[in-house]
Each structure stands twice: as C-alpha cells, then as structure tokens.
Image (cartoon, helix red, strand yellow):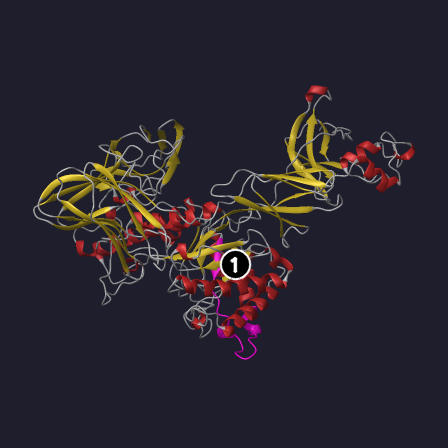
Amino acid sequence: MNTLKLLRIGTLSLLAAHVAMADPVPEDQPLPVPTYGINLGNTLEPPCGEGCWGPAATQAVIDSIAAQGFNAIRIPCAWDSNADQTTFEIDPTYMARVKQVVDWSLDAGMYVLINCHWDGGWMENNLEAEVNPLIDEKMDAYWTQIATTFADYDNRLLFAGGNEPHIETPDIMETLLAYYQTFVDAVRRVGGNNTNRWLVMPSVSPPSWMDHLPTDPTPNRIMVEYHSYMPSLFTIIHDDPEWGRSIYYWGEAYFNDADPTRNATFYAEDAIDWELQALADQYVDKGIPVLIGEFGAYLTKTLSGTEAEYNRASTLYWNNYLAEGARARGISPFLWTIQSDIFDWSTGAVLDPEMVDMVTGGIAPPPPNGAPFAVTGLTATNTGESQIDLAWNAVDGATSYNLHRGAGSGLPAAAEPFATGVTDTTYTDTGLNDGTTYYYQVVAVNDAGPSGFTTEAHATTPGTKPDPTQFHFEADTQRWKADGGQISNVAISAERSFAGNRSLAVNFDGTSGGTSSISLDRAVVPGGETVTFHVWIPEGSAITSIEAWLQDKKWNASQTTFNNLTADSWNTLEFTVPENAIVPFVNFGLRFTTSGAWTGTCYVDSISWRAHENPFRPVGLATTSGSTKVTLDWDETDLATSYKIQRSTTEATGYETIASADTTTFTDNALDPNTTYYYVVVAVNEFGESVASTIVSAIPSQTIEEWRMENFGTTENTGEAADGADPDGDRATNWQEYISGTDPKDPKSVLVIERLTFDENDIVVRFPTVEGKTYRLEKSYTLLADSWSIVQDNIAGTGNTIEITDSGADSRFYRLAVTP
C-alpha cells in the first residue's frame, strides 16, 4: 500500500454552504419521503383500556411492521381516559406503556407519531364557538406531561394535538386553533428536544377553513393532518344503511357488469385527485407538510365468488391509488389498520401481504376481467415551446395505451382520452397553450378492456398563460356540467373567446322554453368577493335572462338575475358572494331562461374572482457577512407584497421580527462579530403570511483592526500584531489565522489536517473546524499547481472535528481551503 502524505495548508479562498447531515431526513422535513405509514389502531386509544378492543400490541408486531417496509407509525392514544379528572395527572402506568411502544417503534427504525385520539370525545366532540376553559386546561396539562416524558426524544417522534375534531363552521375552526395554540405553547415551554419537535394540527374540515396556523417560536415545525375514507359507502360502510346503498366495486375498470347496482357512480379517481391536489395547493406548495393520518378501504366480507373477487380487486386498487397519489404530491399517507386486519398484533404474522404491498409502493392488481395492470412511472416534462413529453413503463399484456389530459388535477379520470391506440411508451403532446400546467394520466388497454389509472403527472409550458382566470376553458371544461332540458351539453370551443383562445360552448337544443343551468361543485370563493362571468349571446337566441347563483356548504342559496342582455357581444355579469357564505359550495353557476324552443350556442369565458391566498414560502435565502453586518438575499416570492425579516441568536427558537422589506434584500447592521445570528424571511400580503423560509446563519466578520485589538491590544500592523507575524509558532501567519478564524496565540488552534486513515478502499480525512467558516477539501496526485481537484466543497464548520470520506484508496495529497 502506498504511503499517504498529509499536507498542512496555506490556501485560503472564498466559498459558502454547509455539510450534509448524516440523518437522511432534513430538519425541515418531518417524515421520510416517501412515507410508508401505518396506524396501530384500536390498541392504546380505547377509553376502556388497552386490550378491550382486541389484543395488546407486542414488540413482535412492531418489528414485523417495520420489516414489511413501513417507515412510520401513528400510535393513537387516550390521555383523558387515563388521567385523574381532578388533577389531570396522567396515570404513570399508561404513560410508561405508551413510552414502551414508542421505544419499540423507534428501535425498529420507524418515525413515530402519537396523538390525542377520540378519547371519549372530550375535546373533538365538544367544539363550540367559544373556548371552554376546562378543555383548554386539559390540553395544557396533558401535553405538558407528554412533552416532559419525551423531552429527550429526537425529531423522529412527532406529536399531534387531536384526531378528527368535529367542526361545523369556520367559526368553530377558530376555537380548535385556540386549543392547538395551547398545545404548541405547552410543548415548546417544556424545552429539551420539544423546542424543535414537529407538531401536527389535525382537521377534517374543508382545507380552506384552516387558512392559518398557530404561532410558533420555532419556524417550520408545524404540519397539518387530514383523513380520507371516501366514498364511505365503499370504504367502510358495508351494510346498506337507511340513507344509502353500499358500494362493492370502485374504479370503472373494476366494475362488475354482473352486479351493476353496486358499482360506484360518484367519487371516482378524479375526486381523490382533486382533494389531494387541494391539500397540495394550500399547504405543501407553500411549505406546510401534510399527512393523511388515516386512510383505508376494506373488504365487504359477506361477499363470495366473483363478487368477492371484484370487491377485493377494487379495494386494493383504491388503497394503492390513494397512497400513491398522496406521495406523488409530497403528502405522507398512513393506512388505518387494527388487530387481525393485515397483521396479527400478538405474533406479528403478516395476514394480508398483498395489502401491505399496495400501500408500500406495489402495483395494484389488474381488473378481474383480464385487463392489464395499471401503468406506472408516468412522467411529464416540458421540452420546448407549446409541448410536453410523456413517458411511462411498459405493461405486460397491454396492446395499447389511452392518454388523458386536463388543465387541472382531478379531471382526466372522468374525461374522454385525448389520444387512444398509442403503442409506444412515450408521447409528445403538442399545440399546447403557453404558461399552462397540464395534468396527465395513462391507461393500459387490451382486448378485455382498460386498466386502472396511473398516478397523475404534470408539467407547465413556458411563456405567459393566455387567460389567467380561475376558469378559462383553454384545455377542457374544468368540471363544469350542464343540467336541464334546454342545454344538451357543454364543450370547449375555439369559435369564440373573451381572453385566450377558447371558451366554454353551452349548446342548447330545447323543444320548449324553460330554465336550465351550467354549474360545478366544490367551488371555493371567499365571502364578499365578486365573481365576474363573461357570456356571449348570439343574435336571435331565445335566452331572456341569466341568473348567477350558488348554494353554500349549508345549502343556503343566493342569486342575482341579469335581464338586460346584449346580443352578439360579450356580456359582463358580476355576482357578489354573501359575506357569510360557507365554502366549498354545493353548487355554483349560471341559470339560463329561454322563452321558447331554441337550438344554438352561447359561450362562457374568463370566470374570475379575487382569490384570498397567503403568499408562498420564500426560497433561496442566503447570507453574506461583512464587518459587523449581515446581508440577506432571497428569491422573489409568488403572491408576496412585502417581507418580514426575523432574527434569533438561537437556531431553534426565539425569532423576532427586526424589519420589513419591499425588496428581496436586506442588510442587518451594528451586529456583534462574536455572535452567530440566525435568520428567516416571511412573505406577506393582505390576506396573511407565509410560513418562514429555511433558517440561515451568519457570523459578522471583524475588520483586521478589530481582530488585532481583540488579540493583541493594538490596531497597528506591527510587532506580534503584524500580518506576517507568527507569535504562537504554529507556522500560520496572523493574516492566515485571521482568515481561518483560529487563535493566533494558541499553537494548537490552527487550520490543519489532523489525520488520514484507511477504511477498506476509502480514505477518511479528519480536520477541526471553526463555526461560521466554510471549507473545501482538495486532493492532488502530483502537487503541481493545476493538479488539484475537489473532494468535497461547501463544508460548514461546526466548531468540532469533521471527517470526510474520499472513495478509492491510492496515493494522494490533501489540502484545505477556508472562507472567513
């Protein structure tokens, strides 16, 4: 083996960045990605005690869950049922039991979430318009005790403040958020690792109701939680309730033609996509993580034969579709499961390996009729002006592929394919609008029929969108539908447009006069805002009036009628939503009244309103240190009108707003050069604030005069204080000590490579670092000036010794470069 040479360096250069963490999950990411999550349901949360709803959990089942590929587990807990109702002290035996199961789960390598589950409904079933002091006191007491017990546990343990809070109105959401504020305050107050712990805010309300989150002294450590069991008549209700009929088969490809009355006629794939995308749009894309704390579809166990076969295939497909769709949007799904469902709680035996595969990255089974497996691996990439390239994995047994496209999530599954009979596994979609995001799905086909749908993929074309309104109809009908005898259908058309290139053609074919409508459901328009419709009415039409109308979530109706309409022109209709309207709307649209029989077409385009959106999270925040100052720069942020700059001298907590800025740069002056400062930036607009940017840090630099005064009591460049002097005899000049941040009077404090060691075929380079400095490790085989190459760049000093591994052992030299 060749002898390695250690080179003490004198090279100094300007760099910036930080060393990668050993933990694969970054600090501002709460769970592994992708997350394969599961629940330990009906176990620690029964108010009657563990074991009364089935066997108690064992280490065997925890180890088995982890061994099957799950990397996160949600452990529902019942604190109130196990607490003294006078002192609110949690039973230490119960606390110890929860701790034991948490320890098993962490030791098995999983991330763990513990919550306050239903627990008799003490909080979530007693939400009213005002805060109840007793509930608030319990929230504080329980979470203080829980946080104290787990204070030394790292960020792999998450806390959730509830489960499925019963929220009837947006006003009651404010009460829930007040309780969650108590939860946050209690956990942070305990300290320890709770200062930086991820805290989860569950809700089952429409996402638009939770349009802000509790305040937290620790930036970016709050996430939200929702559950998914729709349609419930398929997923969890199997006994034909009085108000509905149970569904056995979900997903059109999995319909049983021999039992059509049990096929799902509502809440298909498009509805799952629409709801997941709503969570991504409101939270994930703006920097707030989301978990689906519970999801699941379960077998109708009374079926047999062919019915059971189709029901099982449908159930596996639903679970796979939900889980994969969530992960594709950066959402973390957790399957709800209980004892003797897919695992035996006592022995850990795997009872349903196929279901395990469905929710840990497997492929859904093909329909029982012999159609192909679903397509996987769909990607969409913008590769040029007005076009998007698609690619996907080939499917055995498929003879061709059908392609679906929409201008919004949740459309393709319900629409006709735009391309059929595609035999390759790539496709270039051309002639697209500029600046528009298109969503795609692919279906495999053979003689037996189509497969289930792929997970959605999307891409955005370059340029400026021709019509930026909420409903522009440039690519599809955007879920609008027709109802009534006078309107036969709606379709997109290039015949006319108010803006852009297309509009919605409303085709009439009525044999008599009457009222018919175009509408959509689940619209979210803020109360008090004005909706603008543009409607073209042809000369000679039988249309006498148009009514804009809505029915809100509580079925309250509102409408405005427009009588004075102009033919052969775009009519601008403005409708103001009542202040107290509760979203999302059950129905929203236009009603047309005709005076008699008429066949013809009118057009609707550019439906818009002022959306109430918080800004996106600022990104690209970087620091530049100067003498007693730090300059911050960041990228321009969507929807922001200004920015708040927040600073702390502690990384995890204590951030205070020190300034506001209208531009994307700010200089913080008059700082202590011996202090590390931490910064975040928050974007602001009239509707609220973003979550904070990632945390950056900086140490203001000293001038050389300040450095000499601190170390030698003089500012003069003479004697021991001279730039070229070496008063401690460590062969580093004062100027080099100043740049590297080392002590000029301590020969042990020097920029040096301490040790080189072999690790099999790798070389490990060890060197001490100074906090606030950034290093680059280089190597050479010859020591010639142009022979140096980078081993690792952007290594952040921590104040401790760092080890860097260089792969492939052979003879070489090493040197360090450092930035002040």
Residue where numbered disc 1 is placed: 214
Relative to residue 505, is residue 691 depicted above or below? Answer: below
| Residue 256 on image: x %, y % | 20, 51
The answer to whether residue 444 is magenta is no
Quadrant assignment, res 459: top left
| Residue 153 on image: x %, y % | 60, 58
| Quarter of the picture holding the N terminus | top right
Relative to residue 89, is residue 109 depicted above or below? Answer: above
Task: Write down the region rendered in magenta.
Answer: 72-96
The answer to whether residue 89 is magenta is yes
| Residue 700 on image: x %, y % | 72, 41
What secondary structure is marked by label 1? loop
Question: Closer to the camera, 133 or 88?
Answer: 133
| Residue 492 on image: x %, y % | 24, 37
Give the side of residue 555 with respect to residue 790, left or right. left
| Quarter of the picture holding the C terminus | top right
Image point (48%, 62%), residue name: 177
The kind of residue on which mark 1 rests is Pro
Relative to residue 101, is residue 698 depicted above or below? Answer: above
Question: Closer to the camera, 701 or 63?
Answer: 701
Q: Farthest residue toward the right?
A: 719
Q: Crowdedness of circle 1 by 10 Å Cα count: few (<14), some, many (20+)?
A: some
Give the side of residue 759 with respect to residue 578, left or right. right
Res 584 seen here: yes
